[in-house]
Amino acid sequence: MFQQAPCIICLKPADRVKDVYLHISIKKSEGTWNMLDQTQNEDRNSSTTQLMLTFFKSVSNSPLFIFGVIAVVLSITVPNFLSVRNIVNLLTQSSTIGLMALGMTFVLILGGLDLSIPANMAFSGILGALYMRDIGSPVIAALIMVAVGTAVGCINGFAVAKLKMIPFIVTLSMQAILIGSSIWITKNDSVYNLPDAFGDTILFRMGIVPLPVLVLFVITIITHIVLKLSFFGRWIYYVGINKNAAGVSGIPAETVTFFGYLLSGFFSGLAAIIVTARLNSASASMGSENIVLDIVSSAVVGGVSIYGGVGTALGAVIGVIFITVITNTMNLLHVPYYLTLVIKGLVIISVVGFDSLRSIRRS
Amino acid sequence: MSESYLKMKGISKHFFGTYVLKNVDLKVGEGEVLALMGANGAGKSTLMNILGGVLEPNEGSITIGGASRTFRSVSDSEKAGIGFIHQELALCPTMTVAENMFINRFPVKGGVIDRRVIREQAKTVLDTLGCKIDVLEIVRNLSAGDKQLVEIARALLTNAKILIFDEPTSSLALEEKSRFFDIIRALQKEQKVIIYITHFLDEIFSICDQVQVLRNGETSGDGILKDYNHHDIVSMMVGDLDIRKEKKISKAADKVLKVDQLSRTGVLDSISFELHRGEILGLWGLMGSGRTEVLRAISGLDPIDAGHISVNFNGSMQKVHPKRVKKWAGMVTENRREDGLFLPLSVASNISSANLMTLLSKNRFTVQKQKEEQAARNQVEALNIKISNLDQTAGTLSGGNQQKVILARWLSKAPPIFFMDEPTRGVDVGAKNEIHNIIKNLSGRGFSLLVVSSEIEEMMELCHRYLVIHSGRIVKELPGEAAKKDLMIWASGAGSEAGSEAGSEAPGNVNLGTEGEAEREK
């Protein structure tokens, strides 16, 4: 695993990194690239070759390529890595962290931070679980989870956008409030005995694909489109890059910020549904602080800058899968938990360090 | 005064072949206050930076108390007894008054800072200034005037004999000013050598006794202040009577913007004016006069305490909330890097930022790339913005091209009103001309512009009419053909005296209706 460190550093999917990214790949294999360019010239009339080259060039710029390389390496070296069961398991694991990372992506691009996401997920999950255990309909329970998550996001958004409070303090306090309330409501116990219909529906498999994976897939695409193509997404980048300039341009910066946190809460609610279904129970421990590290590091590894204005939804989710793969591989290799933490930490630091070096070199 | 304590002789300074100072002499004696005057870019700051050890002169010598001195650093200058009280107060806001005063020379006792000594010495110095600030107060909690006193005290603590004040009153309230003048007089009695840099004419006559005026890096006049009056000083600052270009004055067209009694406590006082279609209206004033604040208040960037704004909406004037004025107005801000551009983004998305809603596809949600690029391309061509392609990031452009990108942003939205704060700051001469032409062209096409600039030549080149701002108030309305001298006099706050000589009314009683109209008809 350690030998793969250079590959890890290359996993930098933000669009704006492309040039540097390419630069590095060229440096690494200068000979190969020159050769390819020549081939391209000679075989100008051979359309298949050209098509393949174009494809190769465009793919080699994307994080998917590096990710694929790592996957191939892992599949050869790690037993059971490529088994269908492991892949499905891996993606299912990614789905909850993925949804939360998508929420975090909105906030991070806005130049903010939401530390209350996992706590919000646990809290909404508990309220929904209590409802369906004691009162009834799993459908309403799911709606409650989303509504509670969104409401918490609104409170964060109001505090940050309108009251101009510091995101770190607001969401850290919110996390404490939510975890405290969760323990208090549940008396620090799990809420179980949930209706079977809930778990069965949420974890329903289409063929071999579980619903959560499909949900993550669809929502990632939607989020990616919203961020990259819609006016709202554009506003988010504008505000994240330069709030003052956005205000002068007539962009409703406060409202945009508010909606960023709202969406972060909304995604926490969605994640709550899946986590509750997978555990077939809900408890305060679902919102452990470690998850925040996973979410933030996934997003950052995926090219979302914690300084705002940079990153994509697709990148964040690839970051999530990447972090999950590391965890998963460690499990398959029977690496002790503490060592997994150390390795994860090292990987994150090297990726962020690379990012920082790059910006130093630029300025 | 037989021999002056401080003498600077034959000082020249050039940057890359351009002379900023040419053979300037300066002398001040003990117990004298010298007013150092000059328009922006006249060389005042360069001269004082040489004295402060920030810059080294290319030629010339400095003599202090009879001994020749060369300064290679700020600390050299401090050792020679020079204290520089900067315009931008350089204090650490979260530390106490005493800590700030000792910031670079903490007395140490047994390896730790001797707090008792700090407190006592700080108090002694502040007492000599007749000032009752608590030495343990956190600097952030002090008023601007008190902060300045702390700076003065800090300079006195180093036993500074020569004190340089750079625009000391620009951030002070009225009562703070009079206290400050008392302190200057007290320092004068203690035989300090004081150099006082300011734009404000009325101040120098109340506290200075010598004057030296710089223009384009050369001394254009000096001597005993009593020998001059306001007009003489202004003439020395701006040169002899200027040649004004013929300018077509827009006739009283329909109103597009009306500002009524706009006030912001402590900043703006009853600002009222009207802006007409096709007019370039100049808000003229010195730095700190409130000219930028007027623009920011009208466009909803700063809050207001009173007054209202109306805009022409389908032919009738309607009151609007300042925050909504943006719908009718484009704002080119003073500092394009801070609140203008999105530096890491492409030129195309910088241009489209104010206008995104009209560039959507049929689904009303996604931005249509072709529309966006077409809109950007049109502006890039029209304004002659030099870029390699539309994806080039704004941060890589030159100042002039960056400024054009901001203009392009608003031109593609084409609101009826433009607010422009320092539209040509930091751009080269070529781009400056082009921007001037863009502004004139906009006016010709019926757009109305409110322009702020610290360069008087630029204002005179562009404006059809001026509102002169001083201390947050409109003190005078001047017609487009007003002379440079008048503009300077009114802006410097000396308008009342000069005004009565010229036979016009006193500032404060500005009649924006009839008189303004009459002047523009002429």
Image (spheres, grey):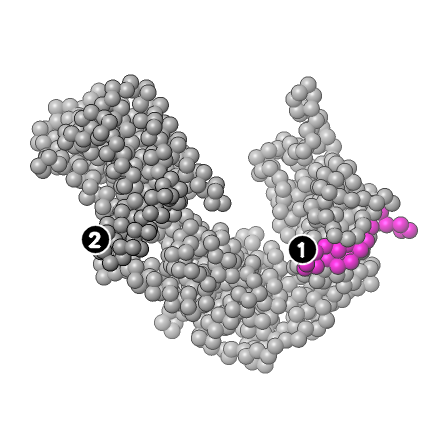
In the picture, measured across the screen, residue B116 lies left or right of residue A31, that is: right
Q: Which of A47/B406 is in front?
A: A47
Q: Is label 2 in contact with label 1 (beta carbons under 8 Å)?
A: no
Q: Is residue B14 magenta?
A: yes
- Which numbered disc covers residue A48? 2
Task: Look at the image and tell me in which quarter the C terminus of chain B lies.
Answer: bottom right
| Res. B267 visible in picture | yes
For disc 1, the chain is B
Q: Which of B45/A48 is in front?
A: A48
Q: Is residue B385 magenta?
A: no
In the picture, measured across the screen, residue A299 lies left or right of residue B166, that is: left
Amino acid carrying mark 2 in the image: Thr
Span highlighted in magenta in the image: B1-24
Which residue corresponds to the image point at 58% horizontal and 74% vertical from the top-left? B480
Which residue corresponds to the image point at 35% horizontal and 31% vertical from the top-left? A5
Query: For numbered disc 2, what is the local secondary structure?
Result: helix
The picture places residue B107, in percent across and down from the top left corner, at 70, 26
- Which numbered disc covers residue B15? 1
- Which numbered disc covers residue B393? none
Is the stretch drawn in magenta largely helix, strand or loop? Answer: strand
In the picture, measured across the screen, residue A213 lies left or right of residue A177, that is: left
The picture places residue A101, in percent across and down from the top left corner, at 29, 37
The picture places residue B108, in percent across and down from the top left corner, at 69, 24
For disc 2, the chain is A
| Res. A308 visible in picture | no
The relative height of residue A46 versus residue A310 in the rendered view (above or below) is below
